[in-house]
Image: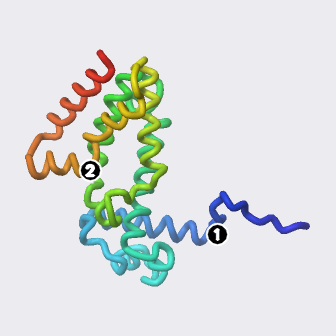
Amino acid sequence: MPIELPRADQPPVERSDAARNREALLAAAQRLIDHCGVDAVTMDAVAHEAGVGKGTVFRRFESREGLMGAVLNRSETDWQASVIGGPPPLGPHDDPMARLLAFGHSRLRLNLMHGALVRAAGHPGARSLAAESFVAMHVRYLLTELGVRGDIPLLATALMAPLEVVVLEQQVDREHIAIERIEAAWDDLVRRVVGD
């Protein structure tokens, strides 16, 4: 029987015990983040919480930044699943305007929640390219569904910009603007772009 090698464009297949270890480590890191905050999470603490040696954490994620990036991407995957298949209005089976408004509110709150995690992952671009592409693609899709005319990619970028971590933290933490006011302003921006 010939040996089947993985294709170059496929990630290597993960052994089941390695997958279990990865999930246990990510769950341990998330529990620590939930209880102590991102800044208190160390590789030692994650190893202890998961019941493994510190070397296991380093072999799996290489650094604290790598671990925090993996936790961030896991959360992004969960959020994307709620957009793709969760209940309306964020998920499918609602009108595009309701979905777009729900998307903005959800993304705004997720980004505020993940500000410290994004920084711990090393840099503002620590989110995977796939996560950012998903957000852009979804906003473009909804704008198209709403019949918006114009340069859809640039209009989508304009709508996403106020939802970025650095912008939100400036408004909420430094300028003390209430989240509800930011949501209302974002809704107003969406309606102006859509022409509603």
The furthest residue to the top: 196
Mark 2–mark 1 Cα distance, whole angstroms, equals: 35 Å
Residue matched to label 2: 165
Q: Is 164 placed above or below 185 here?
A: below
Q: What quarter of the picture does the C terminus occupy? A: top left
Give the quadrant of residue 34. Answer: bottom left
Across and down, in percent, residue 151 comes to: 40, 27
Across and down, in percent, residue 46 comes to: 37, 74
Query: Toward the viewer: 20 or 43?
Result: 43
Residue matched to label 1: 15
Give, as a three-letter code, the residue at label 2. Val
Give the quadrant of residue 67. Answer: bottom left
The furthest residue to the left: 175
Give, as a three-letter code, the residue at label 1. Arg
Q: Residue at x 91, y 67 (%)?
A: 1
Q: Residue at x 32, y 62 (%)?
A: 123
Q: Residue at x 49, y 64 (%)?
A: 23
Q: Mark 1 falls on what kind of element?
A: loop
Q: Mark 2 falls on what kind of element?
A: helix
Q: Are marks 2 and 1 in contact (CB under 8 Å)?
A: no
Across and down, in percent, residue 156 comes to: 37, 33
Query: Toward the viewer: 124 or 107?
Result: 124
Answer left or right for 88 relative to 8: left
Whichever of labels 2 and 1 marks the residue nearer the N terminus, that label is 1
